[in-house]
Image (cartoon, helix red, strand yellow):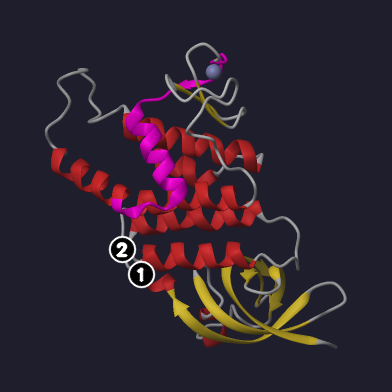
Amino acid sequence: MSTYHDEGVVLTTAKLGEADRIITMLTKEHGKIRAVARGVRRSKSRFGARLEPFMRSDVLISQGRNLDRISQAASIASYADAICGDFDLYANGSVILETMNKLVNTEHESATEQYMLLVSALASLSRHRHDPHMISASYVMRSLALAGWLPRFDSCVVCGRSDGLEFFSVPAGGTMCVNDRTPEARGMTTQCRTQLKALVEGNWKLLDEASLQRCESEGEGDARTGSSRPNPDGDAQCARIVEEWGEYYLERPLRSLRLLDS
Ligand SMILES: [Zn+2]
């Protein structure tokens, strides 16, 4: 039986039989893999603790006829400790893992750039480096862009003009001018367009400043619109477009994003 060695992040686990689990991981060199980990559901399995979601571990894998088997695992980074201990981090971390799991369908196909993006998103989430919602939103937009779905922000997707870009169409792939807007296109403020662009580019300087301003204005309410939600335009609009973009191009709903809304 041939074996291989790699590092990976655990995306999901599923029970198998009495004491085993099937582990789905994104690995650095071998792409997405599914493999059995034997005996990990027995209490005090240290091997099992290294194969929980959000764990980044070094693994030794034996190739089987049907399913591969993980025979050794050593922890590289335990993002799980910080992420699972905080509801907001956990909810946004779940969006990241679910997006990754749905984005890559084929197993054993190298996706090293996606792996590096995943690792950096989980690392900054576990260290609370930025607003958790911004980290997961940026991850959704960047992982999809890396897979080929990069939205256009600087010109109209129909006529190419760069002014009056007041709408955004998810199916058409970007911004639209007033003349060309299609019925499903959503209105988009300049603030929302700037923020979405920053999410795709990973422009944390801009995103951190926006988060700070949001915190400072919290509690002031919103007398202008009479809405009970503070600042309903930019942020909510941006979050809705990220959610639609993810679901449209992954061709299925992102359950964990829906949970963030509720
Ligand atoms: Zn146009």
Q: Quadrant of residue 90?
A: bottom left
Please give the residue where the numbered disc 2 appears in the rendered image: 128
Q: Nearer the viewer, residue 70 or 209?
A: 209
As drawn, the residue found furthest toward the top would be 179
Q: Residue at x 80, y 80 (%)?
A: 63
Question: Can residue 262 be seen from the camera position used here?
Answer: no
Position of residue 135 measured from the top left corner of the image (x, y, whole percent)? 40, 54
Please give the residue where the numbered disc 1 appears in the rendered image: 82
Is 189 magenta? The answer is yes
Position of residue 227 measured from the top left corner of the image (x, y, whole percent)? 24, 21
Which amino acid is tagged 1? Ala
* Left or right of 91 in this view: 172: right
Q: Residue at x 24, y 48 (%)?
A: 209
Q: Residues within 10 Å of mark 1 (few under 14, many from 20)?
A: some
Q: Residue at x 11, y 33 (%)?
A: 220
Position of residue 191 measured from the top left corner of the image (x, y, whole percent)? 32, 32
Give the label on residue 31, or none. Answer: none
As drawn, the residue found furthest toward the right would be 65
Q: Nearer the viewer, residue 207 or 78?
A: 207
Q: Are marks 2 and 1 in contact (CB under 8 Å)?
A: yes
Q: Which residues are magenta?
A: 181-205
Name above or below for residue 105 compared with residue 84: above
Position of residue 61 measured from the top left corner of the image (x, y, whole percent)? 72, 83
Between disc 2 and disc 1, the foreground one is 2
Question: Can residue 44 be seen from the camera position used here?
Answer: yes
Mark 2 residue element = loop
